[in-house]
Image (tube, helix red, strand yellow):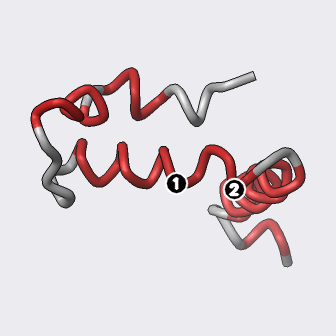
Amino acid sequence: MLDQIPYLPYLLSAFIGIGLAAASGFRVFLPMFAVSLGTYFHWIPVHESFDWLSGLPALLLPVLRP
């Protein structure tokens, strides 16, 4: 039965990742990630002094933190 769901490993991985993030300080990195994502895709306009948030390193840093 579970063999018929091709995306199940990805779904489980996402749920495990969210669970681990929630256990290790989800509220610490999620706001920065959300703002970086919004500025990267130009959904959130920012002042030029915050242009560094729209770069790829700022987008990946909260996700790849140790």
Taking the image as shown, residue 55 lies to the left or right of residue 6, namely left
| Viewer-nearest residue: 17 or 45 | 45
Mark 1–mark 2 contact, CB under 8 Å?
yes
Going by the numbered disc 2, the residue's amino acid type is Arg
Secondary structure found at label 2: helix
How many neighbours does mark 2 have within 10 angstroms: few (below 14), some (14-19), or many (20 or more)? few
What is the quadrant of the N terminus in the image?
Answer: bottom right
**Tag shown at residue 8:** none
Going by the numbered disc 1, the residue's amino acid type is Pro
The residue tagged 2 is 27
How many neighbours does mark 1 have within 10 angstroms: few (below 14), some (14-19), or many (20 or more)? few
Relative height, residue 25 to residue 22 (above, below): above
Q: CA distance from mark 1 to mark 2?
A: 7 Å
- Residue in the picture at 85% in, 45% down: 24
What is the quadrant of the C terminus in the image?
Answer: top right
Taking the image as shown, residue 25 lies to the left or right of residue 60, namely right
